[in-house]
């Protein structure tokens, strides 16, 4: 099992939910109002007067076989609109209850 954590500009919310549905990923946790700044070149997303945009995030625990499909979908979405911003991170799940 893997955990996939996707952080994205709130403008991508509908598209990310569509990706989850298309890939049959029913179980996930959705985080609204996530603040941060991209590690490469993204501007801050802080919800302030100066930096008004905000991010959201989704975390899903999935079978290993689903990871490449998710990353491909995220990569395609990012390529369509680099200025909006989306990133995905994957790590192993050792145990769960």
Image (cartoon, rainbow, N blue to C red):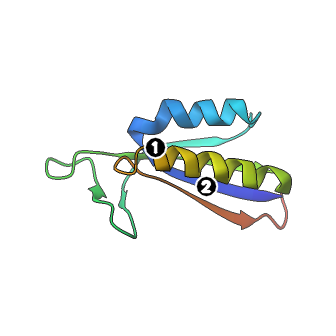
Question: In the drawing, what numbered circle is on residue 43?
Answer: none
Closer to the camera in the image, 22 or 29: 22
User: Where, quadrant-wise, is the N terminus in this rendering?
Assistant: bottom right
Q: Residues within 10 Å of mark 2 (few under 14, many from 20)?
A: some
Q: Is residue 97 visible?
A: no
Label 1, secondary structure: give it: helix
The reply, left or right, for residue 80 in relation to residue 76 is left
Do the numbered discs 1 and 2 sit on residues whose CB atoms are within 8 Å?
Answer: no
Position of 25 relative to 57 (above/below): above
Q: CA distance from mark 1 to mark 2?
A: 20 Å
Closer to the camera in the image, 2 or 66: 66
Q: Quadrant of residue 25?
A: top right
Q: Residue at x 57, y 52 (%)?
A: 75
Closer to the camera in the image, 19 or 79: 79
Q: Position of residue 33 (x, y in %)?
A: 39, 44
Q: Residues within 10 Å of mark 1 (few under 14, many from 20)?
A: few
Q: Position of residue 97 (x, y in %)?
A: 85, 53
Q: Furthest-left residue in view?
A: 49
The reply, left or right, for residue 33 in relation to residue 62 is left
Q: Position of residue 40 (x, y in %)?
A: 38, 70
Q: Residue at x 46, y 43 (%)?
A: 80
Q: Position of residue 42 (x, y in %)?
A: 33, 61
Label 2, secondary structure: give it: strand
Question: In the drawing, what numbered circle is on residue 80?
Answer: 1
Q: Give the residue at mark 2.
A: 5
> Looking at the image, is mark 1 or mark 2 earlier in the sequence?
2
Q: Residue at x 65, y 51 (%)?
A: 72
| Number of marks in the rendered image | 2
Observer-side mark, 1 or 2, equals: 1
Q: Is residue 31 visible?
A: yes
């Amino acid at each position: 099992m893997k955990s996939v954590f996707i952080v994205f500009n709130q403008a991508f919310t509908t598209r990310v939910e569509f990706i989850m549905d298309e890939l049959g990923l029913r179980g996930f946790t959705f985080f609204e109002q996530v603040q941060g700044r991209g590690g490469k070149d993204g501007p801050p997303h802080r919800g302030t007067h100066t930096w008004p945009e905000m991010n959201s995030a989704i975390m899903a625990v999935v079978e290993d076989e689903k990871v490449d499909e998710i990353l491909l979908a995220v990569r395609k979405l990012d390529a369509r609109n680099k200025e909006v911003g989306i990133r995905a991170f994957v790590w192993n799940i050792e145990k769960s209850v």
